[in-house]
Amino acid sequence: MDHSERSSVGPTRRAVNPSPLSNSKSPMAMTATLKDWAQLVRVPNTFTSAADALAGMCLGGAFSISVFEPAAGLIAALASILLYWGGMVLNDVFDLDEDLANHRPGPIVRGAIGLAQARFMGSAMLGIGLALACAAAYCIHGSILETLAVGVLLITAILAYDGPLKKTPLAPLVMGLCRGLNLSMGMAIATGPKLPDLSADLWFYPAAFCLYVMGFTIAARKEFLGVQSRRRLWFGWLTSFAGICLFAWTIWRFPSPSLMQIAQRRGGSAQWIFPCIMLLLAVPVFRRAWNSIRTLRGPDLGLAIRTAILNILFIDATLALIYSGPWMGLLIAALVFPTILLGRVFRAT
């Protein structure tokens, strides 16, 4: 092959196989598959987001609506999923330069999904998610103002975390706020105009979620490192433990109407059952958390983080059981099965 043949072949190869950097930043990328999008939105965690909204509806509905509205619940769950997906997509959009520099795998980095396409889809998911949340509220009581207000706060927190606050010390707090606001959005959907009249003790639950998620977000800040900081892990996991304790204390100190009836029939000791259940469900999380502190290995920390995320389903299921009865609790708890199955195929963090 002479020089002219090599020069004619060279440009052709570059055109067929563009670099990930040029491809991911181009509006036109290779055709994305469903698997690419599933990886981008961290699909295994999808059901934890839906569970938050459903648990919030159970909390608020216990004091405002007598019957759970299945259609509204389905719409609210879908709204929460889209808000979560939108946040995940935009997270990778904002992190593209850093992911490229550190050779982290991802559909945008590989060029499977174009940057402009991801930005558009992430923004659309946030907008549609907010619209669906308002639609769910309208189905129940005809008012959307309260849900709209909480939804806008949630989107603001999502964008703040994905963008300007990601690399600041406030990032874990904002991530925790996202979970707390997601639960609050479910409460707003169920209650509507009665949201300001809810008992003040119910707001301890979003606060507990904020603490719990903030804690393992602190622990996960440097998950990609081979050797972790023991001080950071201690601080993060103790914060998560404080969140679990706040859940248990709130359940004990401010029992739901159904728990009060059980306590009246079976004695005051029955009031301790669900706080103890909340603590026991967290045992696998903190067993793995302790192992991550002991070994300081990145893979051990990753396993602890995945367990902590999975435990969100059991927290939501416990709240639904307490405030709405066994069927809603079982429905949310059953979401653990698709979450585990999807986690075997796609990365969750």
Image: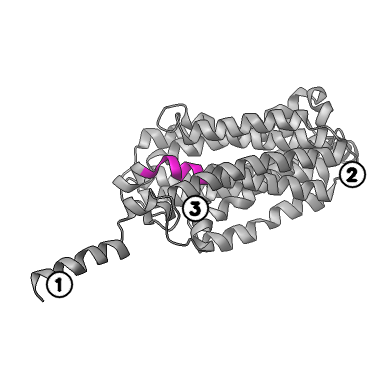
Question: Residue at coordinates 66% horizontally, 43% vertically from top-left?
Answer: 129
Secondary structure at badge 2 equals loop
Numbered mark located on residue 40 in the image: 3
Q: Please, which residue is most extreme toward the bottom here?
A: 1
- Please provide percent x and percent y for residue 300: 41, 51
First reached walking from the N terminus: tag 3 or tag 1: 1
| Residue 196 in sight from this viewpoint | yes
Range of the magenta residues?
89-96
Residue 159 x %, y %: 53, 34
Quarter holding the N terminus is bottom left
Give whichever of 19, 184 is nearer the camera.
19
- Crowd class of label 2 (few under 14; some 14 to 19; many from 20; radius 10 Å): few
Q: Nearer the viewer, mark 3 or mark 2?
A: 3
Q: Which residue is mark 1?
A: 5
The type of residue carrying mark 3 is Leu
Residue 191 found in image quarter: top right
Secondary structure of the residue carrying tag 3 is helix
